Amino acid sequence: MTIAHFFKLALLPLAISQAFAAQADQSSTTAQESPSLVSRFMNDDNPFRINFDLGDHPSYFQVYGLVDIGLTHINHSLPENYELANNFYPYSGAKKTDRTTSRTNWVNGGWQGSRLGFKGEVAKLQAWDHDFKFIYQFEAGFNTLDMKLHDAAQTLADNSGTNANSSVSANSSMNGELFTRQAWAGIDGGSLGKLTYGTQYNPFFEITVTYDPNGKADSFSPLGESGTVGGGGGVSENSRMKNSLKYANTYELVSHDKINYAVINQFGNSAGTSHGNGYTTQLGYESSAFGVQVAYDRFFDSVKSGIAGAGNPLANDTIAVSLYNTQAVLLTGRWMPTKDLKIIGGAEWYQLQPSSSRSIDYHNIYDQTVFGGVANSALKPGYKQDNYVYYLGANFDFAQRVPALAGLTTSIGYYLTKADAIEGPTVSTNSQGKIDTWTAMLDYKLNKRFDTYLAYTTNHFSGDKYPSASNYTNVTSYGAGLRMKF
């Protein structure tokens, strides 16, 4: 597979869009008063939205989604695993095994994980002389290549016991549930704010969607690849908060600048249904030229799943579960010195601590059997580990200076991930390591529905956590993809 193949893939959506445009033009010629289904799909902002009245209440119901398929090459990786939202993980590194080699294959979620959801509202609900709206959103993540729901826990079970190193695996907040991405409902009080309950994004996740120079790309940005640093404040499973209550509001100033704030709490209950408890707070300021967001995150008895008993046949088709207390701080900023240039940066600190409970019985979690039937604290009392992520990058929009290139944007970013040694009565230096990541992306928006992209990332691993005798020092990936939103 040569680089030429990737450029051909990147040009494929251009041909597709031209075919759609030709069909839309032909349909509009024959039926000016009634746009065709294709024309509505290509041109409407929300092609699958239905507006209706529920009694005296204006309402809507909308089906939406995203499909992202790419062709990706990686120089060191285990076989891809289509249970994951993104099928290769260059940021997670690669161990030197018999099955680790260079690979080129189709992947789901080169930029964003494919999804299908529905949302809606029922408006003008009167209470206390104020108008409220009932709002809801449910969203499933799936792999377009095999139409399976995202299920990271299954990839861990597939690699446990004697099946170690069978394929790429990872822990995640998406583990086989139908509406694993989002599932919430609540009340929108306008200037009074929104109050919602269910499975919701951690504000850390929402901030990094906007404040990542490379668009939180699932296969090419550390913030997109890893829920640990891109939303979970140290534990990937916390990037989506289940059984959570969230209040959020935005206050518009006279200058049309905005101040936003939010607080969300995840309620812990029985071991089988809720995995630890915690909260996140967020405060931000946004204007046309400048923005800043800060958030604080605290969790207790957080569950982190992993591969169980490598080499032990009794661990086959099971997963391991460990417990952490965590706290984290995220600070991000953006600046637009001109209309075509956006500079984005951020810093995150998170600390892993011993869990409040030394152990919790978990016989089953995510429909997987827990090896040994118990989750133990990953750190002994008195120990802790500090971790840091720093990043800086820029986006450039060619349309502002070259109108003929409207729709073409590019971005580049540098990310430094640093894990300090685990400290306590003794110091564990083999937990100390660093990852230097460079990522660049080129995106061309064809129309409202389609865009195509080229992307590149390289990750350099150093420190005792990544010994060169057993880990590859450099893991590099590049690819091209097509994304459709509706």
Image: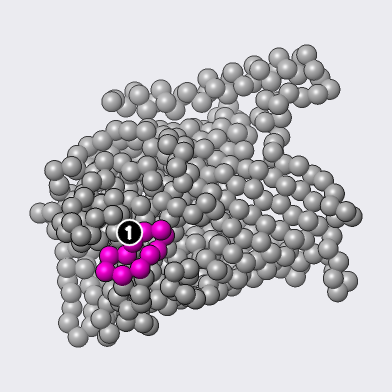
The quadrant holding residue 289 is bottom right
The answer to whether residue 444 is seen in the rendering is yes
- At x 47%, y 75%, the residue is 270
Q: Amino acid at mark 1?
A: Leu
The answer to whether residue 473 is seen in the rendering is no
Q: Which residue is mark 1?
A: 416
Residue lying farthest to the left in this orientation: 469
Is 44 located above or below residue 123 in the figure? above
Is 101 located above or below residue 323 in the figure? above
- At x 64%, y 48%, the residue is 118
Residue 315 included in the magenta stretch of the image: no
For this rendering, which residue is in front, 105 or 250? 105
- At x 32%, y 59%, the residue is 416
Provide residue 260's location: percent of width, then percent of height: 64, 67
The quadrant holding residue 229 is bottom left
Residue 368 included in the magenta stretch of the image: yes
Question: In the figure, is residue 295 to the left or right of 385?
Answer: right
- Where disc 1 sits, the SS reads strand
- At x 64%, y 21%, the residue is 21
Is 201 located above or below residue 340 in the figure? below
Magenta-colored span: 363-373
